[in-house]
Amino acid sequence: MGALLDSAEASQFLNSPSPSGYSQSRPVGLSVWKRVYKRVGPYWKAVIVSMLLLSGAAATQPTLAVIMKPLLDGGFSGKQPSYIWMIPLAVVGLMLFRGICSFFSEYLLMWVANNLLLGIRHDMFERLLGLSDTEFKRGETGRLLNRFTIDAGNVAYSATDVVTVLVRETLTVVALLGVLLYMSWPLTLIVLVMLPLPVAISRLFIRRLRRINRDTVNMNAELTHVVSEGIEGQRVIKLFDGYARESERFGYVNGRLRRFAMRGAVADAAMSPLAQLSIAVSVAVVIAVALYQANTGTLTVGSFASFMAALGQIFEPIKRLTNISGRMQRMLVAAESVFNLIDQAPEQDAGSRTFGAVAGKVEFRNVVHRYDGAGSEALADVSFTVEAGRTVALVGRSGSGKTTLANLLPRFICPTGGRILIDDQDISEFTLRSLRAQLSLVSQDVVLFAGTIAENVSYGALGNASAGDIRKALEAANLAGYVDSLPRGVDTLVGENASLLSGGQRQRLAIARALIKDAPILILDEATSALDNESERLVQASLERLMAGRTTLVIAHRLSTVQSADKIVVLDGGRIVEQGQHEQLLARGGLYASLYNMQFQEAQSAP
């Protein structure tokens, strides 16, 4: 690797958590196999019909070999003139029957595979939506996407492929062995003695293929991650000239994938010539013994031809059966990745009560929070009250605990100590759905969805909002004029994450969404910090309408936006150091006054 990706970074790639959520040394057990085929269970009727059709297709293969005996012994000698038309018709009929059986069996198995994939992805997405906020904060987006796009498909399609190969090829091998025994049991005995050799050879490569498949799954997730970052951060890459850096990162992952693919190819390629060598030896022995039997008059030409035709057909299904080990390992590795997501614990929801009418009083009582693995507490003994319909601003330096405090209210994270109450009732006693129904959020990082303006305003449980309600919300958010200027109005598509709207328009659309929800408690997380002056003025006017009559927690970086708050809570190092109104805090000359004067001086010196 080049200088841009040093050994420490390479080690981080290799030692990063597995994208599938499992340790690389963890064995893929029988339990995963059972779980895969337990999901196939609901489609057992289609599977059984498909197996019967596969059996019919497999039965035609040895029949073609059996035809060789009467063809040579009776047809070419002229003893059976009827064979001139009977045998060709039999061949055509057998192939037609085989084709029909193969078509419908493959159709049914593909139907099963796609329904299996449908169910797996449904369960994965349901679990994904139910994961805790902490899981999403780990930033493993590429790994999650890899499970949906690659792993789930590998499980569904490989599961049916494995069944197809095991059933069809096993039946074919058994039927051909029956033909071999019928034609010459001594020759068949030789074949059976030699047959385990290619199987034993293939088993030597299974463990290596298993490791390679697991490494490939891991690196595929890294590839998805790197490409996703390249797409999302393309502007930063261009502005900060990060082309070489990102090319090195991609080249490293891409190169590792190539090496894993070549290792797998070497293992796969090595199995074939070794198996073919053992097959060639067995065939040579069979020919020698057959020639001896022919010379002694115990084996006819037709019998030998049928035997060799059956023997020639038996090695291909045996090869497919031995090669299925690699496919099975890929399937099981992917299945473990999928099931690790499905098995992840959802966010805790121990509450059983539901809220009735909520006035909106919020109280933080001796709240403590420490993140997992953190050396110190993010919040320590935080206590304050927000009366119903009042506004409290949370201010402080970066990292003082403002956002952590706001995230505790909807229980995105849970306090490690203390209590949070709404209308004097502990929020931990209420279900998450009921609690979050009382809250609205407008943040600096606006999240909107691909769809129309109307769909974003009335998102979620409010999807049945009337056109009049949507119109009122847009007017209150100072967005109605812009929407009216669009050819399709509220039915205008906003693009992925509302990329067709400006920052201020996205912010006001989020405000309209909060307005139509009409929740009694509102959280504003630096909602205007990333806007220009004109956009900030429009958004601030929209926010004032939104805040009217609601209990509001405002996280603010610009202190000029919170001067009118009923109470300002100043945080530093996870603790409350000051509380009061704007003028009171300025008069005290504490941290708030220091922060305010610093911002005021910066504003005065700005051009």
Image (spheres, grey):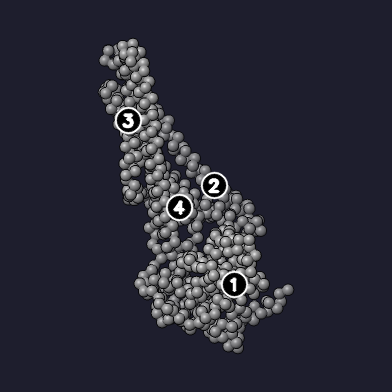
Element carrying mark 1: helix
If you read the primary sequence from the N terminus, does the residue marked by circle 1 or circle 3 appear first?
A: 3
Mark 4 to mark 3: distance in Å?
Answer: 39 Å
Which residue is labeled 1 in the image? 475
Element carrying mark 4: helix
Q: Which mark is residue 259?
A: none
Up-down: is 32 above or below 561? above
Residue, x 45% and y 52% (percent of image)?
147
Which residue is labeled 4 in the image? 147
Give the crowd class for mark 3: few <14, some 14-19, many >=20 residues within 10 Å. Answer: many
Lateral position of residue 240 relative to residue 131, left or right: right
If you read the primary sequence from the N terminus, does the residue marked by circle 2 or circle 3 appear first?
A: 3
If you read the primary sequence from the N terminus, does the residue marked by circle 1 or circle 4 appear first?
A: 4
The percent coordinates of residue 589 (x first, y second) are 60, 86
Residue, x 46% and y 77% (percent of image)?
380
Asked if the residue at tag 3 contacts the one at tag 2, i.e. Cβ–Cβ closer than 8 Å, the answer is no
Q: Which mark is residue 254?
A: 2
Up-down: is 423 above or below 482? below
Residue at the top extreme of this rendering? 78
